[in-house]
Amino acid sequence: MNRAFLAGLVRFAITLAVIGAVLLAVLIPFALPHEHPGTVIAAFLFGPLSSLRHLGNVAEYATPIAFTGLAATVVFRSGLFNLGIESGVFLGGLAATTAALLLPSFGPFTPLVAIVVGAVVGSISCIVPGELRLRWEAPEMVTSLVLNFAILYAGVFFLNYYLRDPAAGSLMSYRIPADAKLDRLLAGTRLNSGAIVALVACLAGGVWLYFTRSGLNLRIVGQGPVFASHLGLPSRRIIMQAQIVGGMIAGMAGAIQVLGLYPRFSWTQLPGLGWTGIIIAILARENPFYVVPAALFLGYLQVGGDFLARDIGIPSEVVGLITAAIMLAVTATAIFQHPAVLRLIRRIRQVEAAR
Amino acid sequence: MTGLLNIVADPATFATVLRVMTPLLIAALGILISDRAGVFNLGMEGMMLTGALVGVLVSAWTGSAWLGLLAAVVAGGLMGALMAFAVNTLGANLIITGIAMNLAASSGTTLGLFFATGDKGMSGALKSGVMPSIDLPLLGSIPVIGPFVSGHNVLTYGALLAVPLVSLMMARTAFGLRIRAVGVDPKAAATVGISVKLIQLKALILSGVLGGIAGAYLSMGYVSWFAQDMTAGRGFIAIAIEVMGMGTAWGTLAATVVIAIAETLAITMQTLGLPNELMQMIPYVVPIVILTIWTARGRAKRAALK
């Protein structure tokens, strides 16, 4: 077997063990006061796997966050910590709704047009902080953080004054026309054709990043900016391209979420899918190929949380605690760069080399 | 136009500016201390949220707003210590740790509220305390000025007092010097015998304490209840304020005043019938513009020196 593969397997096994330990460490305190602590943990862990419908729910949750995970991966790979994907999702959903409501129908291509509009408009949220950074050195993390809220309120203004259905009880848009909606794939769930697009997008992203010249250039610019400039790479243009692509993927996430799941656009808060995307990018070690399993895993946790809420009466927010703890644990260098681990990996490599 | 003038000259408008300012200023000072120690506290939003909930729960439970504040201080300090543990002992990434703190606080406070009251949204059913307002004895009786300076929340005075205190601490005490040394160059600081981890732990605890107080003001002064995610991005505005203030306490005060005036303007212009969503954008757009102008000017200056 390949040595690098075996060594990677060690890291993977440790990651799994760490995640398992964190899951139990957070769940057990919530389970203990319950009459049968075992059933609480079983409901969380095995509930999502208990039927095809629940597996469909997992994939349904995973769809938008696979997109935002991919978006975060592309943006972070450029070396910029641009958090604009959070409002990119919001903007993408709003723009896709607007396109579906105001543009004429394009027959079977209506959803496609709406998603493209959502992606293009959504990319603004990442382009602005990126441009401010590249042109004037304004710190992109701070500007994108506050721009998220500025975009949110601008969007709510637009929703209130241009898309609002006065007949609806609360602040929401007119009904999204049926021909703009995405096809449902599985009865009893809201799993839609967006899931397939997400899968293809992540695979394409992985091929781009690891098997094309422009992907290699992006990785060089992100990891070694000085080296990139010695190579004569057009760093500014490459970074900007990553912001545009990342923003467009975030916009697609919002568009597909709204067209696939909701009868109307009704977000009046940031949906939080961008933050989840950051978590996925971290779990996937900024590798697009791993984004799909990472998104499915978080979807699985979310469905597990729904089981807790429905069957046991523990709010599904437990999932947030688990996710936060996992974020810390899987990035902890104390675990993954521990001398014992490094020694083990080295020994595996030497044994293989000796053969 | 006279309507606008009346609003500006009104002590109530001034009081609104101070009310808006208080949590932002306390939180921004907390971020400042962490930033100068080289451990930028992106988890401020979460620390504020935790302080807000703990303050309400403990003050309802004990019947004392001050004990609520004390509990919020302890909770914030603990979160700061946790963050230092994650960064320096576990070796997790600083920014990721901050994001994780925010996520954990958002979920944790919802869970905490649910287990304490059975409600996930608001603490309205709890009889929680409110931090008292103070009428200044002598200053308050001066005509014209009196109504402006007197009668504000005790934490508002505390926040204003914290500005010179933090400034003095950073500039004139050994602890402040060590914080700055660690922030500028941890390796150099370590070679002269400063424990980098200990200083960063203390700085993050202090940062968390201020975050806890800022949160307690939100739920026991700004309003008198806790609501899910009630900080609504104030921790993030505080980050922008700290960066605008260029890492000094007085600069932070100046930046806070600018943002607070922008937000007060937004609140009062809504009463004049302008679209309230667009007005709500103002406090978020102002920092972007100011930050961009400042960094652009800084770059122009550097270019001129070359």
Image (cartoon, grey):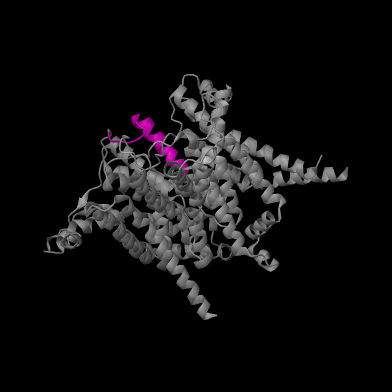
B94 vs A235, left or right, is left
Q: Is residue A103 above or below residue B241?
A: above
A39 vs B221, left or right, is right
Let me know if residue A74 appears in the view: yes
Tell me how many marks there are: 0
A322 vs B138, left or right, is right
Q: Is residue B91 above or below residue B57?
A: below
Q: Residue lying furthest top in this view?
A: A35
Q: Residue lying furthest bottom in this view?
A: B305
Q: Which residue occupies 65% across, 66% down? A: A226
Where's residue A294, x and y in %?
Answer: 60, 39
Range of residues picked out in magenta? B102-124
Q: Which residue occupies 82% across, 46% down? A: A350
Where's residue A149, x and y in %?
Answer: 40, 51
Where's residue A198, x and y in %?
Answer: 59, 40
Examine the structure image and report whether residue B51 is included in the region drawn in magenta: no
Examine the structure image and report whether residue B118 is included in the region drawn in magenta: yes
Majority SS type along the magenta span: helix
Where residue A10 sits, quadrant-wise, is: top right
| Front position in the image: A235 or B53 | A235
Let me know if residue B91 appears in the view: no
Quadrant of image for the N terminus of chain A: top right
Quadrant of image for the C terminus of chain A: top right
| Front position in the image: A324 or A36 | A324
Where's residue B287, x and y in %?
Answer: 39, 61
Q: Is residue A183 above or below residue B135?
A: above
